[in-house]
Image (cartoon, rainbow, N blue to C red):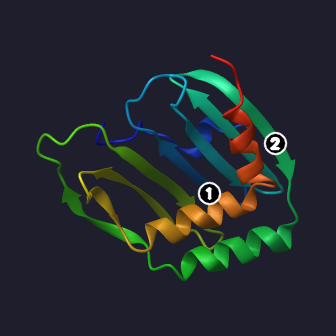
Amino acid sequence: MNKPSQDTHEDSQLPAQYYFKYRFGDSSVPPRYHRSYFIEIADDKIHFVVDSYGDILLDKTFDVEQYAVKDFENALLKLAMGVRPEKISKGCTGGTTDSFWLEFSDGRKLNGHVYNCGGEGYGNLKGKIKEAKGLFQSMVPGYYNLMKELDKIPE
């Protein structure tokens, strides 16, 4: 999977003056271990959904203060993310995908993805991807505990 599905905030459940979404697409592993998820931030809400091959394992919405979203937005802007010419993987399979849909309050937009496979980053996104992913995760209250709890779900 090199490209994420076309996704915009029009299909979001959240109203927005700005809109931020990160999606992690997990590698092809047995369902017990597969965890894809998205974190969506818009207006005063954070929407966090974890799935395993389409089966929803967790779906939570949290309130967030506007100042926290503004701080998040400012931190994202400092990561120098941008779009580059598409780098195509030539047969690499089994990787993970980081996809971002960013619509800043000043009207700027950035949509891109990185397919991580064989130690390489393919796709059309450049910049501090790992740090951006961490920023999204930090916005979800109890992110690591929530993910840890999902590992306890019986097969």
Residue 48 falls in which quadrant of the image? top right
- Give the mark count: 2
Identify which residue is drawn at 26% across, 58% down: 119
Identify which residue is drawn at 55% across, 24% down: 32
- Between disc 2 and disc 1, the foreground one is 2
Identify which residue is drawn at 41% across, 29% down: 29
| SS state under label 1 | strand
On screen, residue 95 versus residue 6, left or right, reads left
- Residue 17, position as x, y percentages in the image: 72, 60
**Vertical placement of residue 103 versus 45, above or below:** below
Give the label on residue 61, or none.
2
- Furthest toward the top, the residue is 155
**Amino acid of disc 1:** Phe
On screen, residue 149 versus residue 84, left or right, reads right
Q: Is residue 108 visible?
A: no
Give the label on residue 20, or none.
1
**Amino acid of disc 2:** Thr
- Residue 22, position as x, y percentages in the image: 56, 52
Name the quarter where the C terminus is drawn.
Answer: top right
- Residue 132, position as x, y percentages in the image: 54, 67
On screen, residue 90 versus residue 154, left or right, reads left
- Residue 80, position as x, y percentages in the image: 45, 80
Task: Report crowding for label 2: few under 14, some 14 to 19, many 20 or more residues within 10 A (C-alpha).
Answer: some
Give the label on residue 2, or none.
none
Tell me whether circle 2 and circle 1 mark residues in contact (CB < 8 Å): no
Residue 121 falls in which quadrant of the image? bottom left
